[in-house]
Image: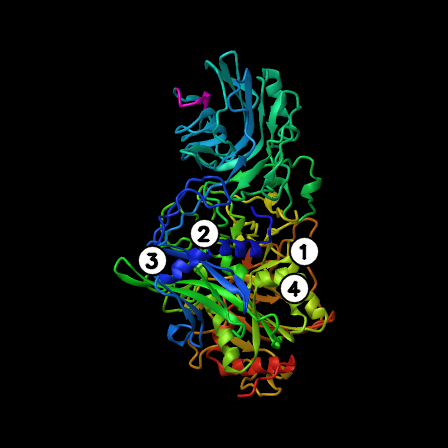
Amino acid sequence: MSKLPRREFLKKTAASVASASALASLGAARPEPSTVTAGDIPPHTPMLVPGVHSYAEESLDAGETIHFRTSSTVPHDLSVVRLGQDVDDFASDEVLHAFPRSEPNQQAIHPGSYIHVAKGLAREEPLSALTLECWVRPWSWESDQALITTFDPQGDCGFALYLTEGGWVKFYLGDGGAFRGNWIHAYKRNEVRRWQHLVLTWEADTARLYANGKFTGSWKVPGPLRPGRTPLHLGAAGSGGLASDFLDGDLAMPAIYERALAADEVKQRFAAQALHPPNRKDLIACWPLAEEFGDRVEDSSGNQHHGRIINRATWMIGGPSFDAESVSRFGPYDPIQDPKRGHGLRLASDDLYDCRWQTTHEYAIPQNAKSGIYVGRFEFDLDGEQRKYHVTFIVRKARARPKEPILMLCSTNTWRAYSATPFAANVSDRQLWDTQGLENATEHAPSYSCYRNHRHGQPAYAFGRTMPWPAAGPDVLFSTEDVNYSHLMRGERFAHIWLDQNRYGYDVAADYDLHRDAGQLEGYKVLIINGHSEYWSIDAYEGVDRFLRNGGSVIVLSGNTMFWRVSYDDDGGVMECRKYDTDIGGREAASPGEMYHSHDKKRGSLMRYAGYPAWKVLGLECIGWWPITDDKFGAYEAVDSDHFLFREPERVDVQEGGLFGQSPDGSLPRVGGHESDVRIGRIRNITKHIPEGQTLPEEPPGITTLAQITAEDRRGIDYFGRWEPLDHGVYAEMTYWDRPQGGQVFHGGCIAGGWALSTDEKFSALMRNVLHHFGVQRERA
């Protein structure tokens, strides 16, 4: 991994392939597919993905250069486009630049995490004795999986300790040359997702295997035994010079000794439960895996066999001594101070967080480009059908340009969270996504998200930001076509267009932009939190609170707001989110003890359980979600129609009990559905059971309910994540809050706020009143 900040690293990468970019623009002949490696990682088994797939910077300033990194198996046209004034009519879009037609240029992906040890063992010197030791918790027995190896059956064969299809342990002990005989199948394992201690010893032409401290068998294996020239891998082996046979499992305390451990020593190592590294005597290498962050693992032997994690893997899962289910979901817990937690590293054969593709097209966004949502639009024929593929990106204002009065926040964290199939097959019609994504373009391409686990069941906790995200496209629906509802990028566009049509000046930023520099809020009158703004970092949360305390104003046109906590790796390349409790959308097989983020070791999962509840900043909290059907969408019912926001400066044509936030005839669009927020008192009202040691929060003063949405026979989640009947019937609220600690918040409580604005003049008049009260004036016509 480059030590440069990711933005500078990507720019340098782009510069290094400028000639390739020029060829792409000229439509010149393309090179053969990249099938071996991707430059900054060791040689790695490739996977080729058919169709057109691409990614670029998530956001950039006007005046900066966008770099498209594309893999394609068909000729294609690419244009850079600012999305226009009609959500579903691409003819309204503004084309900034069209590239000449490009020929196919397939670039491979290289999924699979493991540890590469650059300083291997002495290649030719024979070993008089050897011990391989590790703890492993497998997640799958569907294929052969390497544990500790210097082994390549098509190259040099030193030693290898493996798990096999069906759960057997097998090993190979060779002379460092060509494959010289059969594997030895040694022991049948019993369960997946359970820690197992394995020790393989060799001395005097005899190999012995121990499992969980017990001797399981011995075999005659004549020497000599040499490591050979194949790289030393943990969690992988070699195949024709490429890393392969990746482990789908958790690894703890792998070690290599230059002697054979005795049976009583093996028992002692098992009893230690991977909490203490072995004595350095006769130790060749040992990796305690205690770092819990980053891609470097230290060798504790003193012999400098340090490792590098390829494709990130997952830290903060604990070791064999740790019972992750015993950690309280709500109570105090500090993983750093837990002497029994230990350390483990979770590996996955589909781990991938950076495609590492070369730039194929680049374009300098004009300095005067309007801040907003843009796409790279690919058009091509595939299987006899015309298709489109979009790469969405945010253009921020040019640095030298004055700020508009409004900053519109795009919920890009949520777009990323739902991107279950980054290598989805190209489709010819509108994309109808759900939490599982679309069909993959190739069967085993990485396909995990905040709503879908890794292929072999490992909970998905991290998501790369230098990957395709077709879920963020402008034609993506999250409903049947007759409902025509969106909650990702397309759903946010309605509010942008409403601001344009009502002549309000605004700038646009991505979630990561706010996380990286919440100080950018200074100078804006209003922050608008728009759409499905579900995933928040602590830095962004605290930045919004500071903005309000300093006199700023916030408009929330979002539901399920500030719900799950995220954090980022130091270079911003990976978003981490640890969701617990399947009843409320957590990952299957996730445990409370795994809810602590690798970056800061703080509790994750729900923001309110991590100490950062949405209601403290914005006044409302999420109460639940429901099917996306016509009958589940409701309209606002006015509660306080005499409030000044209904009267000044425009009189909103609604009386107490009157409906608004829907089409004039009462049909869709309607504002209230899918996911929504209410005052904390509503959630207190349905909370029947309080966990030991916990208390219900008191609502802060000064909040006024302007409108609400009700329904019969609906359930919601209480403050502690239980689904309970909504006895009061209220599943969404619109509020105004003059915060005692500073700042004003207007909260619509619904994801579909912009959708309803696009069709309802009553809601539009109310929104103009809110902006007027918050000091924002309309531009002259």
- Image coordinates of residue 243 in percent, x first then y, are 45, 36
Please determine whether, in this image, residue 747 is positioned above or below residue 110.
below
Disc 4: CA contacts within 10 A as few (<14), some (14-19) or many (>=20): many
Identify which amino acid the numbered label 1 is placed on. Answer: Gly
| Residue topped by disc 1 | 611
Asked whether 395 or 729 is in front, the reply is 395
The label nearer to you, 3 versus 2, is 3
Chain-order first, disc 2 or disc 4: 2
Disc 3: CA contacts within 10 A as few (<14), some (14-19) or many (>=20): many
Asked if labels 2 and 1 touch by Cβ distance under 8 angstroms, the answer is no
Q: Main secondary structure of the magenta part?
A: strand
Q: Quadrant of residue 485?
A: bottom left
Identify which amino acid the numbered label 2 is placed on. Answer: Trp
The label nearer to you, 1 versus 2, is 2
Compared across the picture, whether 191 is left or right of 718 comes to left
Chain-order first, disc 4 or disc 1: 4
| Residue topped by disc 4 | 518
| Residue topped by disc 2 | 357
Give the CA separation, mark 3 to mark 2. Answer: 16 Å
